[in-house]
Image (tube, rainbow, N blue to C red):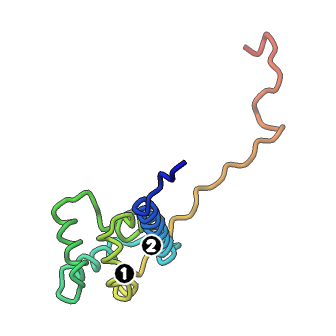
Amino acid sequence: MTAWRTPDIHAAEDFLTSAVAEADRAMRSAQQNLKGREPSTEDVRRVMQFAKSSDASPAMRQLADRIARGAGLSWRQVLTGEASYDPLVRQALEADRATLNELIKGEAAPPPPPRRPARTDDDDEPTQFTEDAW
């Protein structure tokens, strides 16, 4: 039986494996940097101004242009890591990581919703129904 996996297929599998691993690392890195913080409106404004400035990397300026043209991305998605699947977003975040960490002060994540207490036997609802209860 001949092997159907040629050297080209092996190379493609290796490339795919490394690309998936890199995407996973980038997503974990983005989530770790903002863990417990949500970018505030002021943070988004500061990042937008930076992205349009000459201090930003070419990748960041390209990303700003793409978002301004309405490419289906928002700055909030970029800053929270929701758009880390996009190669341009990853490239821009890596190129300007130090500056972005200074610009994003964040706000505390909203507290989890309160849990409802467990029901107890002495609730007001009847446990047995009789004909006259209806």
Which of the two labelled residues, at mark 1 and mark 2, occupies the earlier sequence position? 2
Q: Is residue 38 left or right of residue 117?
A: left
Q: Quadrant of the C terminus?
A: top right
State the image coordinates of residue 10 (x, y, percent, origin top left).
46, 62
Q: Nearer the viewer, residue 59 or 133?
A: 59
**Which element is circle 2 on?**
helix
Q: Is residue 58 left or right of residue 36?
A: left
Residue 128 to residue 77: above or below: above
Asked if marks 1 and 2 touch (Cβ < 8 Å), the reply is yes
Per the model, the C-alpha gap separating discs 1 and 2 is: 9 Å
Q: Which residue shows up at 38% across the image and 63% down it?
A: 85
The quadrant holding residue 30 is: bottom left
Residue 108 appears in the figure? no
Q: Is residue 50 left or right of residue 125?
A: left
Residue 3 to residue 53: above or below: above
The quadrant holding residue 38 is: bottom left
Residue type of the residue flagged with mark 1: Glu
Circle 1 Cα neighbour tier, 10 Å, few/some/many (<14 / 14–19 / ≥20): some
Residue 62 to residue 122: above or below: below
State the image coordinates of residue 40 (x, y, percent, origin top left).
37, 72
Q: Which residue shows up at 36% across the image and 81% down it?
A: 94
State the image coordinates of residue 7 (x, y, percent, origin top left).
43, 63
Q: Nearer the viewer, residue 13 or 134?
A: 13
Circle 2 Cα neighbour tier, 10 Å, few/some/many (<14 / 14–19 / ≥20): many
**Which element is circle 1 on?**
helix
Disc number for residue 122: none
Q: Nearer the viewer, residue 120 or 132?
A: 120
The residue indicated by pointer 2 is 26
Q: Is residue 27 left or right of residue 134?
A: left
The quadrant holding residue 105 is: bottom left
Disc number for residue 94: 1
